[in-house]
């Protein structure tokens, strides 16, 4: 049951990150407040931590994406792919109770639901490259 709640929480974070791509005139706080109006109390701390964490670390996350997305500029990626990748990288780096393999599997599941078919291998490739570097313990990742 807890796993299902976490999956739903991750989906809600993705939806807020995606929404933020379009509502650039609104603060993350405004997007969060609107999105959480009808949210159950379960996992709210996780949702808050990850959503605001991604917003705070967005430049760092985008630099990592650029490092591993050879030939792709972050602003040329689809908003869906960009949101999924940011979410997953944040979890791998900053949420210690989420194993990297779980974060990547969940990112792939989100991509199956929201991204084009051709985006899945792209998303998976970037995330696995970053995971491999994190596992090596490289400080530059």
Image (tube, grey):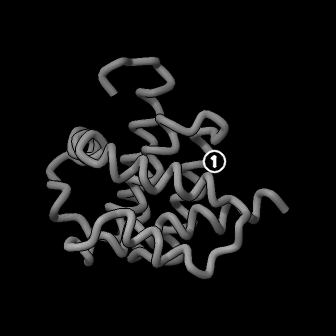
* Residue 69 location (% of width, % of height): 25, 48
Up-down: is 97 above or below 65? above
- Asked which secondary structure carries label 1, the reply is helix
* Residue 20 location (% of width, % of height): 32, 70
Say whether residue 53 is left or right of residue 79: right
Say whether residue 70 is left or right of residue 130: left
Say whether residue 17 is left or right of residue 97: left
Up-down: is 65 above or below 9? above
Q: Which residue is under mark 1? A: 102
* Residue 62 location (% of width, % of height): 25, 47
* Residue 85 location (% of width, % of height): 39, 55
Residue drawn 56% across and 68% down?
A: 11
Q: Which quarter of the rendering shows the C terminus? A: top left
Front in this rendered view, residue 32 or 63: 32
Front in this rendered view, residue 49 or 74: 49
Up-down: is 16 above or below 129? below
* The quarter of the displayed image where residue 90 is located: top left
Residue drawn 36% across and 47% down?
A: 126
Say whether residue 67 is left or right of residue 15: left
Q: Residues within 10 Å of mark 1 (few under 14, many from 20)?
A: few
Residue drawn 27% across and 39% down?
A: 60
Front in this rendered view, residue 131 or 61: 61
């Amino acid at each position: 049951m807890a796993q299902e709640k976490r999956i739903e929480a991750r989906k809600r974070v993705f939806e807020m990150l995606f929404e933020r791509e379009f509502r650039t005139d609104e603060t993350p706080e405004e997007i969060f407040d609107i999105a959480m109006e009808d949210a159950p109390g379960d996992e709210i701390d996780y949702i808050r931590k990850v959503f605001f964490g991604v917003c705070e670390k967005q430049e760092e996350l985008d630099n990592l994406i650029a490092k591993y997305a050879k030939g792709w500029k972050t602003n040329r990626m689809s908003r869906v792919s960009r949101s999924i990748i940011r979410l997953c990288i944040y979890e791998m780096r900053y949420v210690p109770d989420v194993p990297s393999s779980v974060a990547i599997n969940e990112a792939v599941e989100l991509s199956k639901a929201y991204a084009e078919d051709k985006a899945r291998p792209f998303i998976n490739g970037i995330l696995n490259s970053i995971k491999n570097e994190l596992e090596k313990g490289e400080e530059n990742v």
